[in-house]
Image (cartoon, helix red, strand yellow):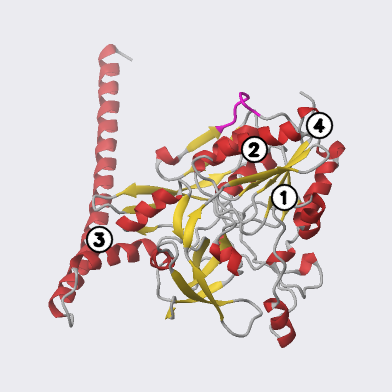
């Protein structure tokens, strides 16, 4: 081939490539223009309705409320965790992550239009009054909650310290609604509680992931180790039952505390910025003593990240019942009006590539917490936990691996009169963690007792010598 022919061949290839890029670009622009046209058509419908309401509604409508209501409605069609936060609620949320807010101390979600308790916080007015995981709040101050958004309900439940509030609750197995009159309190969430057990073993209770949780756990481990014979910890129980989650940064720091290398968790979403991997580091890692992690259906989000990471790395034995299954990442974006939008932007994945979404973390040893279940079931395997799970929420995002949550197996019905009396029977208060004898704690809490038994099985749980 002559030099001239080679030149024309190169020019022809460049022209063909340019033409391909131009056609592809035109197709892309055409598709985008078509999408924009469809969006403008839908926005035209919205503005028409807005104008109609402002012109013909029986009384003058507030434009701000109309727009905020439209935003809430739009976000509510996406998934259970996306939503609009008005100025007051957003400010309250920022305060809550620092560990203090006014209210009843309950984690709630929406299922079939009803407000359902995921878990009451330790030491809160709700826990002291006997509110349980799985309770459905039907009324707040006599008003039915079916039409409340989650944000609206939380705003109604919160209030100044000392102010009373009455809620009506439906509880599985109880015929009539249960009325509770509670006094709001300043909910100072103590995310970490701990104590030395005996024989060189320690216990740490992590109730929520807040700004200081990782540092608080480090301090707790130092205290426990100081009480242990020879200043050495032989094993640890990390209790994350009914932990609704919290700050991702704290979950990563706590995972890093017990892992010396490898992936703790990674996220994947449409936006490249949402595709991140978080790794453990050797510096600052705790000694490789055995660890037992306690979880249940109220363990969600960050609690599932930590338990999933420790399980995937073979670092801990998981004891309890299957976790909630909230494996999605929410990004909070502040708005000019002082409010914010919380939007689901990615999903969490464990080291093994499993998505937490819907699936949650399955325990290595399943032990049902008798305190969270009806007492008339035949055996732990047949009992049906009252805790709500992610898969029960309307609009929950599918698991990307195709996992389908079959839901809890149904045990014997407790809807008869005898069952109702049994459910309404006042149960004994739990022993005080910091001061009760170890034997009393283990006898009262079946899951903790089993976890302690497994922890003492040192030969099975002992990590390889490094």
Q: Nearer the viewer, mark 1 or mark 4?
A: 1
User: What's the magenta region?
Assistant: 279-285
Q: Marks 2/3: CA distance?
A: 57 Å
Q: Is residue 59 magenta?
A: no
Q: Marks 1/4: CA distance?
A: 19 Å
Who comes first in sequence, dot 1 or dot 2? 2
Q: Which residue is mark 4?
A: 229
Q: Nearer the viewer, residue 355 or 333?
A: 333
Q: Nearer the viewer, mark 4 or mark 3?
A: 4
Left or right position of 412 against 4: right
Local secondary structure at mark 4: helix
Local secondary structure at mark 1: loop
Q: Which residue is mark 1?
A: 435
Q: Which residue is mark 3?
A: 38
Who comes first in sequence, dot 1 or dot 4? 4
Q: Quadrant of residue 290?
A: top right
Q: Which residue is mark 2?
A: 220
Who comes first in sequence, dot 2 or dot 3? 3
Classify the position of the N terminus by image quarter.
top left
Q: Marks 1/2: CA distance?
A: 16 Å
For the point 77% across and 29% down, the residue is 232
Q: Residues within 10 Å of mark 2 (few under 14, many from 20)?
A: many
Contact between marks 1 and 2 (CB within 8 A): the answer is: no
For the point 82% across and 53% down, the residue is 439
Location of residue 351 in the rendering, given as x and y in whole percent from the top left corner: 62, 39
Left or right position of 117 against 203: left
């Amino acid at each position: 081939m002559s030099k001239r022919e080679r030149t024309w061949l190169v020019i022809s290839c460049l022209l063909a490539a340019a033409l391909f890029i131009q056609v592809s670009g035109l197709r892309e622009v055409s598709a985008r223009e078509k999408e924009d046209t469809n969006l403008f058509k839908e926005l035209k419908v919205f503005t028409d309705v807005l104008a109609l309401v402002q012109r013909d509604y029986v009384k003058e409508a507030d434009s701000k409320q109309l727009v905020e209501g439209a935003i809430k409605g739009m976000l509510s069609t996406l998934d259970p965790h996306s939503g609009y936060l008005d100025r007051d609620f957003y400010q309250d949320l920022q305060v809550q992550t620092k560990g203090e807010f006014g209210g009843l101390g309950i984690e709630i979600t929406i299922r079939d239009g009803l407000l359902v308790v995921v878990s009451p916080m330790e030491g809160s007015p709700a826990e002291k009054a006997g509110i349980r995981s799985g309770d459905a709040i039907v009324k707040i101050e006599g008003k039915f909650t079916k039409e409340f958004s989650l944000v609206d309900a939380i705003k109604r439940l919160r209030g100044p310290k000392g102010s009373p509030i009455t809620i009506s609750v439906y509880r599985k197995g109880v015929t009539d609604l249960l009325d509770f009159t509670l006094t709001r309190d300043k909910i100072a969430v103590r995310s970490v509680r701990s104590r030395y057990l005996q024989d060189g073993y320690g216990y740490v209770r992590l109730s929520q992931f807040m700004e200081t949780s990782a540092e608080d756990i480090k301090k707790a481990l130092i205290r426990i180790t100081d009480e242990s014979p020879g200043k050495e910890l032989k094993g640890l129980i990390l209790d994350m039952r009914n932990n609704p989650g919290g700050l991702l940064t704290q979950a990563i720091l706590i995972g890093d505390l017990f892992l010396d290398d490898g992936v703790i968790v990674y996220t994947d979403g449409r936006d490249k910025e949402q595709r991140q991997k978080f790794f453990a580091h050797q510096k600052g890692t705790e000694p490789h003593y055995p660890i037992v992690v306690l979880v249940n259906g109220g363990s969600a989000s960050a609690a599932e990240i930590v338990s999933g990471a420790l399980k995937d790395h073979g670092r801990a034995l998981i004891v309890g019942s299957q976790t909630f299954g909230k494996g999605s990442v929410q990004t909070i974006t502040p708005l000019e009006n002082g409010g914010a939008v919380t939007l689901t932007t990615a999903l969490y994945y464990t080291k093994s590539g499993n998505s937490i979404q819907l699936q949650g973390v399955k325990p290595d040893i399943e032990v049902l917490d008798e305190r969270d279940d009806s007492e008339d079931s035949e055996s732990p395997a047949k009992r049906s936990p009252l805790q709500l799970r992610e898969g029960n929420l309307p609009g929950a995002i599918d698991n990307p691996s195709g996992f389908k949550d079959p839901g809890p197996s149904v045990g014997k019905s407790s809807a008869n009169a005898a069952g109702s009396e049994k459910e309404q029977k006042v149960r004994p208060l739990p022993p005080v963690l910091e001061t009760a004898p170890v034997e009393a704690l283990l006898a009262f809490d079946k899951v903790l007792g089993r976890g302690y038994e497994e922890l003492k099985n040192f030969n099975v749980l002992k990590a390889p010598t490094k």
